[in-house]
Image: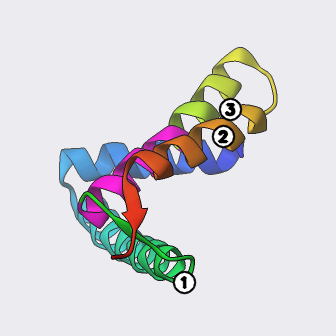
């Protein structure tokens, strides 16, 4: 996870700088995020739920939660806190979903 995080962070920084490599990263990231959003909506629908916010907002919150947990683990030199994710992710999903009418 550490190496993945460092590579990802470097590409994110290049994306912010908007150089050629960064633009490629941004395009790829948009595709990954769109695929994640589509999967999330499909899975929720299969279990009888729908989002109460835009899929892009829910994915940003979920991905940000994971990224923050990973960054904290790396900074503190400890394993990723899976307990935090097991509690937080379902709570976030409950707060942005409702049963399909």
Residue, disc 1: 46
Q: Residue at x 28, y 62 (%)?
A: 56
Viewer-nearest of discs 2 and 1: 1
Q: Residue at x 34, y 75 (%)?
A: 34
Viewer-nearest of discs 1 and 3: 1
Residue 20 left/right relative to 65? left
Determine which quarter of the picture holds residue 95.
top left
Specify the farthest residue to the right.
79
Nearer to us in this view, 30 or 91: 91
Element type where label 2 sits in the image: helix
Q: Residue at x 25, y 57 (%)?
A: 53
Q: Residue 65: where, in percent of width, then height?
A: 50, 39
Residue, disc 3: 84
Few, some or many residues within 10 Å of mark 3 (<14, 14–19, 20+): few
Q: Which mark is residue 85?
A: 2
Residue 2 left/right relative to 91? right
Specify the farthest residue to the top.
76
Residue 26 in sight here: yes
Q: Residue 16: where, in percent of width, then height?
A: 23, 45
Looking at the image, residue 68 lies above or below residue 46: above
Q: Residue 3: where, in percent of width, then height?
A: 68, 46
Determine which quarter of the picture holds residue 99.
bottom left
Q: Earlier in the sequence, mark 1 or mark 3?
A: 1
The question of residue 99 being in magenta is answered with no
- Circles 2 and 3, Cβ within 8 Å, touching? The answer is yes
Q: Give the CA separation, mark 1 to mark 3.
A: 25 Å
Few, some or many residues within 10 Å of mark 2 (<14, 14–19, 20+): some
Which region of the structure is painted magenta? Answer: 54-66
């Amino acid at each position: 996870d550490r190496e993945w995080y460092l590579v990802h962070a470097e590409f994110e920084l290049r994306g912010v700088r908007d150089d050629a490599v960064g633009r490629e990263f941004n395009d790829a990231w948009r595709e990954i995020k769109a695929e994640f959003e589509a999967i999330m909506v499909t899975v929720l629908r299969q279990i009888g739920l729908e989002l109460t916010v835009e899929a892009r907002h829910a994915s940003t919150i979920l991905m940000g939660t994971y990224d923050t947990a990973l960054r904290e683990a790396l900074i503190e030199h400890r394993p990723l806190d899976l307990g935090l994710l097991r509690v937080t992710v379902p709570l976030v999903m409950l707060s942005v979903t409702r049963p399909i009418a």
